[in-house]
């Protein structure tokens, strides 16, 4: 399973790449806001870092960038996507899972602009983007579970559908809005291709009380061993 970082902060992206070897980045308007930079500045900074690292190409290190969420019409989505895609060959355009969004994504893929259909909350929403060849789909996890839904079956169903019809591995499944290490595990067990989450969740996934206890036990033994 691939790990993407859900962030637009350059310090976090650099740290996650150098420490965890992340495979890509996902951003959204909230992440851009939290970066403290204007939209174009934030995505241009990411593009320049990618180029400096020699990671050019969306097949090497994809970065999902979301269009203006005010845009609802297919034609305007396409126009906006073209402007964003021109900034970097690594950019995959995030399009909402609406009727106009799916139509726009279909046309963008035919134009050679890769898409990530996002804000998916049902298996049914995930089928058309795959049928139309989108690069990614992003089923959200944390929001659903925060409202009392168990997302394991939801992700398992998307994986099963994709395997049934030959979509699996062509349109990659990104488990998005992941809030806990357990959700990372659930997505991995279900067979999702990718998980994307914040830096702190990746750090938390490497913590365990018994690991800390074990280090303490071995440290104490070391200190009582003659060198």
Image (cartoon, rainbow, N blue to C red):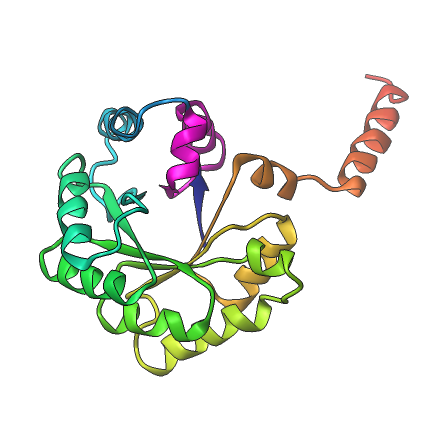
Which residue is nearer to you in this view: 31 or 184? Answer: 31
On the picture, is 79 further left or further right than 206? left
Residue 144 sits in quarter: bottom right
* Whether residue 43 is situated above or below residue 96 in the rendered picture: above
Indicate the position of residue 60 as horizontal and vertical percent values. Answer: 26, 44
Indicate the position of residue 6 as horizontal and vertical percent values. Answer: 45, 41
| Residue 156 visible in image | yes
On the picture, is 165 further left or further right than 212? left
Answer whether residue 180 is magenta in the image.
Answer: no
Indicate the position of residue 12 as horizontal and vertical percent values. Answer: 46, 28
Q: Residue furthest top?
A: 227
Which residue is nearer to you in this view: 185 or 200? Answer: 200
On the picture, is 30 further left or further right than 204? left
| Residue 27 visible in image | no
On the picture, is 118 further left or further right than 56? right
Answer whether residue 8 is magenta in the image.
Answer: yes
Q: Main secondary structure of the magenta part?
A: helix
Q: Which residues are magenta?
A: 7-35
Residue at position x 11%, y 62% in the image: 110
């Amino acid at each position: 399973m691939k790990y993407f970082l859900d962030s637009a902060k350059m310090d976090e992206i650099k740290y996650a790449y150098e420490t965890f070897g992340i495979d890509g980045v996902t951003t959204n308007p909230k992440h851009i806001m939290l970066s403290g930079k204007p939209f174009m500045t934030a995505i241009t900074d990411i593009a320049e870092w990618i180029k400096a690292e020699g990671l050019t190409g969306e097949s090497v290190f994809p970065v999902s960038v979301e269009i203006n969420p005010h845009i609802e019409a297919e034609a305007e989505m396409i126009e906006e996507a073209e402007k964003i895609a021109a900034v970097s060959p690594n950019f995959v355009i995030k399009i909402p899972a609406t009727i106009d969004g799916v139509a726009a994504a279909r046309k963008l893929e035919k134009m050679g602009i890769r898409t990530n259909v996002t804000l998916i909350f049902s298996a049914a929403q995930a089928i058309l983007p795959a049928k139309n060849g989108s690069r990614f789909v992003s089923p959200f996890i944390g929001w659903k579970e925060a409202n009392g839904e168990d997302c394991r079956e939801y992700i398992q169903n998307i994986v099963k559908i994709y395997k049934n019809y030959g979509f699996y591995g062509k349109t990659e499944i990104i488990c998005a809005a992941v809030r806990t290490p357990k959700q990372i595990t659930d997505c991995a067990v279900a067979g999702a291709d990718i998980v994307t989450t914040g830096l702190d969740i990746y750090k938390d996934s490497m913590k365990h009380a018994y690991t800390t206890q074990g280090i303490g036990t071995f440290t104490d033994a070391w200190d009582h061993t003659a060198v």
